[in-house]
Amino acid sequence: MLWRSEPYWSQLAEFVKIGMRRPGEDGWGLHFVVQAGARVFAVLPDRYVDVTGKHYSILPLGRDKWEVQFLSLEEHELIRANAANLLEIMRRNPELKTKFSAFIDGIRDDPEFKAKFLAAMKG
């Protein structure tokens, strides 16, 4: 695929990094995807991830560090439904952003913690 070769990849990666750093109206940075035939790739500044037919979120893990997190449909809908509230809380409390990154690490690394978190979100 041509977009993954030089000089295109370096230019695309820099464009993606700039866009992901700059929050839009909803507080999130831009999200970049490339569709190549029937395949879809989430593009991060340092790599691309095949997300064809999958539910996913791109999580900020620190400056210039993001991760693609694959989700079930239920997880995807819960996160989308609560994202605006979370962003507003973090906007009002910058210290919470650091704590939230640690929290996301816990969700990613511990399936039991992830299950408890999703159960709590359901109320």
Image (cartoon, rainbow, N blue to C red):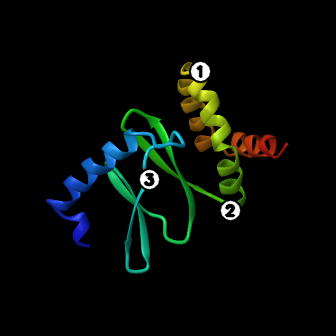
For the residue marked with disc 3, what is the amino acid?
His
User: Is 54 placed left or right of 6 in the picture?
Assistant: right
The residue under the point 68% across, 62% down is: 73
Amino acid type, residue under disc 1 in the picture: Asn
Which residue position is annotated with label 1?
93
- The foreground one among 81 and 36 is 81
Quarter of the image where one finds residue 56: bottom right
Is there CB contact under 8 Å for labels 1 and 2? Answer: no
Give amino acid for label 2.
Leu
Judged from this view, the residue extending furthest toward the bottom is 37
Q: Earlier in the sequence, mark 3 or mark 1?
A: 3
Tag in front: 3 or 2: 3
Q: Specify the quadrant that holds the N terminus.
A: bottom left
Q: Residues within 10 Å of mark 1 (few under 14, many from 20)?
A: few
Query: What residue sits 69% from the left and 56% below the top?
Result: 77
State the separation of the CA atoms marked 1 and 2: 30 Å
Pick the front one: 16 or 24:
24
Taking the view exactly as shown, the residue that stands out farthest to the right is: 123
Q: Residue at x 41, y 65 (%)?
A: 41
Q: Which mark is residue 55?
A: none
Q: Is residue 104 left or right of residue 33?
A: right
Residue indicated by mark 2: 73
Residue 97, percent across and down?
A: 54, 27
Q: Badge 3: how crowded within 10 Å, few (<14), some, or many (20+)?
A: few
Picture quadrant where residue 5 is located:
bottom left
Cα separation between marks 3 and 2? 19 Å
Query: Which residue is labeled 3 in the image?
Result: 31
The residue positioned farthest toward the left in the image shown:
7
Secondary structure of the residue carrying numbered label 2: helix
